[in-house]
Image (cartoon, rainbow, N blue to C red):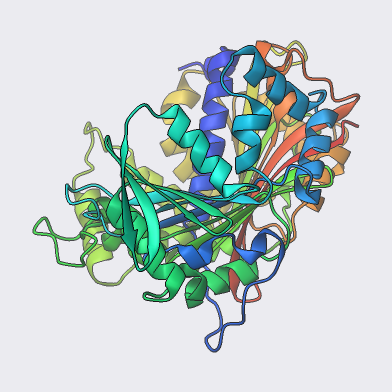
Amino acid sequence: MRFRSALGSRRRALIAILAVAAVAVALAVVLSLVLREGEVPAPADGIGDIPAAHLVPEDAALYVALGTDLDSDAWRAAFALLERLGFDDPLGRIREGIADEDAADWDGEIAPFLGNAAVLFLSGDRDADGDGGRGGAVIFHASDARAAEAVILRRRDDGFAERDYRDVPYKVMERGGALAVLGEHFVYAADEATVRAVIDARVGATRPLADSGDFRRLRNDLEGDALAFVYLRPAALLADSLGAPADGDAREAGPDLLALLGLDDLLAEPIGLVVRADGDAFRLEAVMLGDPKPIASILRPRESRFAAMVPAGTAVFVSVYDLAGLVDGLFGSGGIQQRLRGAVLDSAGEGSELGDLARLEDALALLGGETALAIWLSDDGATGEFVLLAEVDDEERAREAFGALFAEALAAGDAALSVKDGVAAFGTSAAAIEAVRGDGGPALADTARYAGAVARLDAPLAAFAYVDVLGLFASGVDEFAGLDLDGDALGLIVNLAWEDGRVRVEGALTVAPAD
């Protein structure tokens, strides 16, 4: 295997890194937040007045609120940031694109829906429409709810039946869907059962999502103006894959892998997430009301020793603390987790597809301090180097464990290994390791682009990843050809940390000086 060829295709690398970023955010969102018990105050203002939440049934599995007041401070900040990224007049471009495609008339068919917020929700009941599907609706707190309904009726070529429920009129479309105007709100529901559930919530016949204690806790913890606020209950959305259907009955197939590892509690409680445009960054913050115990070891805030060692030109840097504790938390000495671990390791023999697993376990057991991965490109961008770094207490044992784990690559001359001064370094070459160990100039931690990204986070660094997006892709990917940052760098940072008894997950796409 040639490690230097791993970054050979820039376009494939772009797709891969975006996928990794998406996975990182997804994993971040499923982490938990332990909150104080007791009375929950009403939610804050901004998009925090949680648009239309008083119309959404409490059992909603997913609630997504998007601000649609394009003159709001939140959207002005977003458009300003897009312009800084080189996209001139982004709103004007959107309007021109719609007009050029004859997709819709902005003033007559789009503007009535805008002005406040739009909400999408999915029901927690997978049988809401009677055929195994899931009910749901889009609710617009519109500038003109009647005009919004008229747009839909003009766009659809089927008829409708007018009905009434709790003295509230609504329309049931011939080919599916139901429409209702509730004051300033226009409701476009998947089915009649869903529009009736919305009416029940509105008139107080059932409890709305706005009165849910978990919903309020999450929104209050993520208070302030935002472009979007998301609330979801993974256990309801992913019931089939979590080992139990939504009605809570046990599955005949038995416990799933998440339960075996003790991770099912991470998805057992709701998640809250906000997206903001804040100064020089698009920011994402997420919290969850579950139990973080299996992963708690990697979430302790601390300084990154290796960020001050890797070269300033590092394009990708990932740092985690106490991987050994994480493995122990997932495959610890208690009950079914240990039996699962034993079964997996027993099946890993010489010559088997799992033959490296036991050696990997030996290496992971040494990683009680910081472990980091650094990737950087050559000056011409044609090749890449990477170094894997780990703090180790027992250098001799580390030399044996990592030597055995990477024996094939070391023997082929595709990699190098160095263990000294309490640090094990495995990389693409001796020169790459020397770039980390030697005194070759400024480090990543010394750069303004990295420091600017870190500064956009509210929580201290714990388990995190940083990507210099332009440094990794811009010289060889057409998608970045028109991007003009006027000397700035574009960075992506994702951080997971335990702070004040809470797990905070933050991501930021930042614009900072390029040094």
Apparent side of residue 413 relative to residue 265 in the rendered image (left or right): right
Question: In the rendered view of the protein, which quadrant contains the C terminus?
Answer: top right
Residue at 65% in and 58% down: 462
**In the image shown, does 122 or 12 lie closer to the viewer?**
122
Q: Is residue 447 visible?
A: no
Question: How many numbered markers are drawn?
Answer: 0
Residue at 39% in and 44% down: 360
Name the spot of residue 231 as percent of width and height, x first: 50, 59
Name the spot of residue 212 as percent of width and height, x first: 47, 75
Q: Is residue 408 visible?
A: yes
Name the spot of residue 12 as percent of width and height, x first: 53, 17
Relative height, residue 431 to residue 74 (above, below):
above
**In the image shown, does 20 or 185 lie closer to the viewer?**
185
Name the spot of residue 347 as percent of width and height, x first: 19, 45
Residue extending furthest toward the left = 252
Residue extending furthest toward the bottom = 38
Place residue 437 in its image quadrant: top right
Question: In the rendered view of the protein, which quadrant contains the N terminus?
Answer: top left
Apparent side of residue 2 relative to residue 171 in the rendered image (left or right): right
**In the image shown, does 265 or 118 lie closer to the viewer?**
118
Apparent side of residue 52 relative to residue 234 in the rendered image (left or right): right
